[in-house]
Image (cartoon, rainbow, N blue to C red):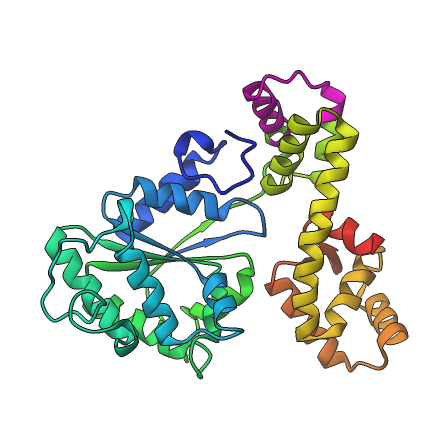
Amino acid sequence: MLFDPRPKERREEIFDREKELEKILNGMNEYPISLIIGIRRVGKSSLLKVALNEYSGVGIYIDTRRLYSSGSGSISSATLVDEITRILLGKGRVGFLRGIKVEGVSFAGLHLKPRESSWIDVLDGLEQLGRKTGEKVVIAFDEAQYLRFFGSRGGKDFLAGVAYAYDSLPNVSFIFTGSEVGLLHDFVGIDDYSSPLYGRISEEVEIKPFSRELSEEFLRRGFEEVGLKVPEEEIILAVDSLDGIPGWLVEFGFNYWKKGSFKAAMEATMNRAKAMIKEELFELEKRSPRYALILKAISIGLSRWSQIKDYVEAKGGPVTNARLNSLLVNLEKMGWIKKEKGRYLMVDPVVEKVVRED
């Protein structure tokens, strides 16, 4: 169902993403490393899960935010090993290791306990699993920029393991998704000489918001699915407010279906958006309180560098030019803002509205 608010897991639940889905599946088969990039709530997780469900080999999905949260702001090798072992030995389709004995692998239920295993041990084990089953193993890390909190060296030890697998383990490959697109690129570091993955070949799939026409058609199809006849002007108004970001369109469609009116649906959607965005802003402010001031300035129309600087200094005290530039670049990398023709703009119109009205 198009208006199901949970991440999709089947191809028929996806709207107009056939090219992107095929590109992801091709990357899983042909490339040791694939990147799936796009702003928040654009549908990356759904496409990834659908691709993993259709993949002919062994697919392992890891929500890196979960690892980060369970580690209270850091990710240890033991936490990652535990998570992969839990998935491999779990119930149902993903219980890949049940009944399989692989010699010399340090997994729980085989030879060693997870806490005695390293990231490299896991990769070696997955390589042997691939040989045993005759299937390639793909490990997918959703919101992978959080892996920069792996270990004590900014994720370098994690990347060293990926580089080892790239060079030596042909049955193991990786997918990384990221909403903080610039941070993900910086972390993986394929173009960074200091990165363990420098110069490695990868596939990159960008998931973009829907066009206006597709956004309107998405809502029409969704309402048709649930048997609702919605006035065309209300569909147009919804897209005016929510743009082409599938996460917000789904939220609106689901709320309209359940509440029966445009006003109630839009109010519920914006209330949900406020709660989600405020939580994200809270995390952002922990990095620097000036991030919130910059976003506020841009949301009220202060789009020039000098205007933003004046606002930030008026509200938060002096800030050097270099520091302000650094903060703006970081917000671009994290997918909050974009720069067009010398002006800074918010990427997500719903975020812009929430920040402006807060």
> Is 157 rendered above or below residue 206?
below
Q: How many marks?
A: 0
Q: Eyeballing the image, is 121 above or below 10?
A: below
Tell me where residue 9 appears, x and y as whole percent: 41, 39
Residue 79 shows up from this direction: yes
Residue furthest right as drawn: 314
Q: Which residues, given as a range, are shown in magenta?
A: 215-235
> How far across and how far down the image is residue 203, in percent?
37, 54
Residue at figure coordinates x 44%, y 83% from the top left: 153
Q: Where is the C terminus found, in terms of image quarters? A: bottom right
Which one is nearer the viewer's eye here, 85 or 125?
85
Q: In terms of image quadrants, where is residue 308? A: bottom right
Displayed quadrant of residue 246: top right
Q: Is residue 323 above or below residue 332?
A: below
Residue 258 forms part of the magenta stretch: no
Residue 169 visible? The answer is no
Q: Magenta stretch containing residue 218, yes or no?
A: yes
Left or right of 157: which side holds 94? left
Residue found 50% across the figure and 62% down from its top: 65
Direction from residue 336 to residue 208 in the image, left or right: left
Q: Residue at x 46, y 36 (%)?
A: 17
Of 343 and 328, which appears nearest the observer?
Answer: 328
Q: Residue at x 11, y 71 (%)?
A: 104
Q: Nearer the viewer, residue 303 or 98?
A: 98
Q: Is residue 259 above or below residue 133?
A: above
Answer with left or right where residue 60 lies relative to residue 187. left
Residue 264 position in % (x across, y down): 77, 32
Residue 27 percent coordinates (x, y): 33, 50
Relative to 37, is 85 on the left or the right? left
Q: Main secondary structure of the magenta part?
A: helix
